Image (cartoon, rainbow, N blue to C red):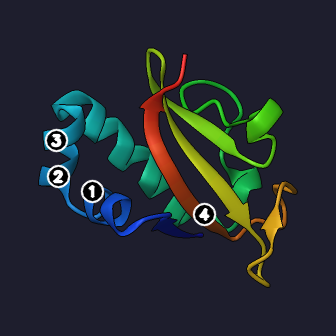
Amino acid sequence: MEVYGETSKITKIIGDRRQLVKHYGKERALKIQQRLGEFSAAENLTQISYLPPARLHRLKGDRQYQFAVDIGANWRIIFEGYDEYDELSVEKSEIVTLSILGIEDYH
């Protein structure tokens, strides 16, 4: 899958290991890189595990079109998925592009 940041700031952070460490610490930065590598290696979202440690899950409420994966304790990578026509999608088998919205503790 292709992975992009929603903003240029997020794109810059996820594309540079030093920026990841600066913003999230060494341990969390390694987990973020691991998840991003899993995304890049997958053909679509069905290949990302819904079981720990990644624990892919769809969000609810005002985030109903978003997904998250765990990177530790309460921290998650939040993203939206897009199909091959660049349309927002929640069908895991159709999602081939991810837009990272943020990396946060939303609990």
**Any mark on residue 19, and which?**
2
**Is 63 rendered above or below residue 83?**
above
What is the quadrant of the C terminus in the image? Answer: top right
Q: Residue at x 43, y 65 (%)?
A: 7
Estimate the x, y position of residue 2 in percent, counting from the top left.
Answer: 55, 73
First reached walking from the N terminus: tag 1 or tag 3? 1
Mark-to-mark CA distance, 3 and 2: 5 Å
Mark 1 lies on a secondary structure that is: helix
- Depth check: 15 or 8 in front? 8
Tag 2–tag 4 contact (CB < 8 Å): no
Kindly check if marks 2 and 1 are in contact, taking CB atoms under 8 A apart as contact: yes
Read off the residue under disc 4: 98
Residue 59 in the image, given as x and y percentages of width and height: 75, 34
Residue type at mark 3 is Val
Q: Is there CB contact under 8 Å for labels 4 and 1?
A: no
**Residue annotated with mark 1:** 13
Q: Amino acid at mark 2?
A: Gln
| Marks 2/1: CA–CA distance | 5 Å
Q: CA distance from mark 3 to mark 4?
A: 22 Å
Q: Amino acid at mark 1?
A: Ile
Crowding near the residue tagged with mark 4, few <14, some 14–19, many ≥20 C-alpha atoms within 10 Å: many
The image shows residue 24, relative to residue 7, as above or below, that is above
Total marks in image: 4
Looking at the rendered structure, the secondary structure element under dot 2 is: helix
Query: Residue 34: which quarter of the image?
Result: top left
Q: Which residue is mark 3?
A: 21
Q: Secondary structure at mark 4?
A: strand
